[in-house]
Structures are given as C-alpha cells and as structure tokens.
C-alpha cells in the first residue's frame, strides 16, 4: 500500500482506547443449550472480540481484524471487515483453551502497517482464590477475559489526524439540536467549543471519536475511571504492605547484627 499523501502532524500523539478478549459460556440445557450439529465433545460456546470502549464506533481507525484460531477449528483464519458501531467478533464452540492471534488492520488513511495482538481464550475461571476466580465471572455463567488497551498513533498523517479528531458525523437528532442552538444566535466561546465536538455520546457518556473512558462502571462495561481508581488504590495498599514488610526485615537484620557484634566482643573477651 502506498503511503498516504501529505505530511505527518509533528509532535502529536493520538490514542484511542479499545477492548479485546473472549467471553465463554458452558453448554447447559436450560441456560445455554447446545445448538444442533455441534460435536458431542464441545463443552462451551465462546466469542472473541475487538471493540470500542463503551461500545463506541472504532471503524474510523480500525478497518478490519483477522482472527487466527486453533488449527483444529474449521476455517481457522477469519477476516472480519468493520461494520460501523459493531464489534469485530467471532462466535465459536469448542472444548479447549488456546491462544488467539488478533491482527489489526488500520484505516487506509493512516498508512500504518497491521499489528498483532495475542489473547488466550479462557473457558474456565482461574485464580488463587475463589474471590479471584469470581472476578472472571459475569452474569452467573459467563467466563470473561477482557483486556483494556490503547492504540497510539504517533505523528499521524494530516488527513488521518482529521479523521481521528474531527468528531463523528452528526446524528439527525443532534444535527437538529445544533441547528436550533445556532439559530438563536448564541455568542460566546463555550458554544463554539461545544459545536466542535459534534459526535454523539455512548450510554456511559463517552463521546464518539474521543479518547474518553466512562466515569463509572455499568454491567458489562468494566473499564472506567472508577476501575482505574480502585486499581490505583490496590497498588497503594500493596505498596504500603511491601514497605511494612521491608521495614520489619530491616529491623530484624539490625537486631541480628547487634547480636553478632555482642557475640564477637564476648568471644574476644574470653579469648
Ligand atoms: C488444549 N492446546 O489441549 C489446547 C488445544 C484446542 C481447542 C485446544 C476444537 C474445536 C473444533 C477445540 O476446541 N480446540 O473442533 O471445532 O487445551
């Protein structure tokens, strides 16, 4: 592919959050019956996906995704073309866990080469404790293994930069609202600013074509400032514990050194 015409925007980095991973569910007569034709040895249905944070559209920067599944699965290399506002995803059934190769193909305007991610399909929750395992369970039976990631575009081409930051096209309702407020002849800087951000908002409050993440969690949307703060809190607590343990070890060492000095002097006295 020829590189796009135009210059790169120097000194600028644009990042876009996204989520990838798998969701698996054991077959169960009541809640997840096995569809006809699924082999006897298959124990789970599962999905692998790449999507926007809070399900916002990402197809303006991510054009298509290739999923490479285990060779035992028929037609194991699957290319998914982007469909606006829909996750890139594949539904399958099987019995075993394996590593999935996820290759990201960017918008042609970006001039970026494809990049590969690796994700381990999880059918069974894991962890040292039941509590840890529980964090992988959603809606009772589902086993989730999801990763938050940020795609960084370093010094993007000008045309691509425009696509990244210009905001999503207005929905008809938003267009009407914008016309209305504009028609009243409102002056002032803040109005102008609002107009720049033409995109709609997701349910969690995230603007289209932005790098925002939601303030709080919602069911099935665990990546938010709330989660970030909880993680930071956990890290602070772990750090305090490590400091405490280190202080204790130091104290014990000092005691031992003192004892050693005592023994040495006793020894020299008796000699
Ligand atoms: C394991 N190393 O032993 C892994 C291999 C393979 C999973 C897991 C078959 C699906 C199908 C399937 O689930 N393969 O036949 O369509 O655990």
Image: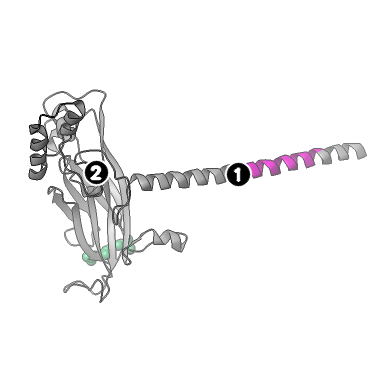
Magenta-tinted stretch: 244-261
Query: x and y percent of residue 195 in the render?
Result: 15, 33
Residue 232 visible within the image: yes
Query: x and y percent of residue 87 in the render?
Result: 19, 51
**Left or right placement of residue 243 versus residue 178 in this view:** right
154 shown above or below 62? above
Residue 45: in magenta span: no
**Left or right placement of residue 241 versus residue 269 in this view:** left
91 shown above or below 107? below
Which residue reaches farthest front?
A: 184
Binning the other alpha carbons within 10 Å of mark 2 as few (below 14), some (14 to 19) or many (20 upward) gives many
Residue 244 image label: 1
**Left or right placement of residue 151 versus residue 3 in this view:** right
Ligand 1 image-quadrant field: bottom left
Query: x and y percent of residue 138 in the render?
Result: 32, 61
Determine whether the residue tagged by mark 1 lies in a helix, strand or loop: helix
105 shown above or below 88? above
Q: Which residue is drawn at 14% across and 34% down?
A: 163
Residue 250: in magenta span: yes
Distance Cα–Cα, label 1 vs label 2? 40 Å
Image marks 1 and 2: residues in contact by CB distance under 8 Å:
no
Which image quadrant for residue 8? top left
Q: Residue at x 23, y 62 (%)?
A: 72
Which residue reaches farthest bottom?
A: 29
N-terminal-most mark, 1 or 2:
2
Q: How many marks?
A: 2
Residue toward you, 151 or 265? 151
């Amino acid at each position: 592919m020829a590189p796009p015409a135009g210059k790169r925007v120097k000194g600028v980095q644009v990042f876009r959050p996204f989520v990838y991973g798998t969701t698996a569910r054991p077959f169960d007569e009541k809640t997840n019956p096995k569809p006809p034709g699924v082999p006897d040895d298959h124990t789970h249905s599962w999905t692998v996906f790449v999507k926007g944070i809070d399900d916002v559209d990402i197809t303006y920067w991510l054009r298509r995704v290739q999923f490479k599944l285990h060779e035992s699965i028929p037609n194991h290399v699957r290319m998914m073309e982007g469909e606006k506002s829909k996750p890139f995803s594949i539904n399958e059934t099987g019995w075993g866990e394996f590593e999935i190769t996820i290759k990201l193909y960017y918008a042609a305007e970006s001039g970026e080469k494809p990049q590969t991610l690796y994700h381990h399909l999880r059918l069974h929750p894991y962890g040292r404790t039941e509590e840890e395992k529980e964090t992988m369970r959603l809606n009772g039976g589902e086993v989730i293994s999801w990763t938050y990631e940020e795609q960084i575009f370093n010094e993007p081409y000008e045309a691509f930069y425009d696509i990244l930051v210009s905001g999503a096209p207005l929905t008809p309702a938003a267009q009407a609202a914008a016309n209305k407020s504009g028609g009243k002849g409102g002056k002032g800087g803040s109005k102008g600013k609002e107009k720049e951000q033409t995109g709609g908002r997701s349910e969690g409050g995230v603007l289209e074509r932005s790098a925002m993440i939601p303030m709080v969690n919602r069911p099935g949307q665990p990546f938010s400032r709330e989660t970030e703060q909880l993680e930071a809190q956990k890290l602070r607590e772990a750090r305090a514990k490590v400091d405490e343990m280190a202080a204790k070890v130091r104290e014990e060492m000092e005691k031992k050194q003192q004892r050693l000095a005592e023994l040495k002097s006793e020894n020299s006295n008796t000699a």
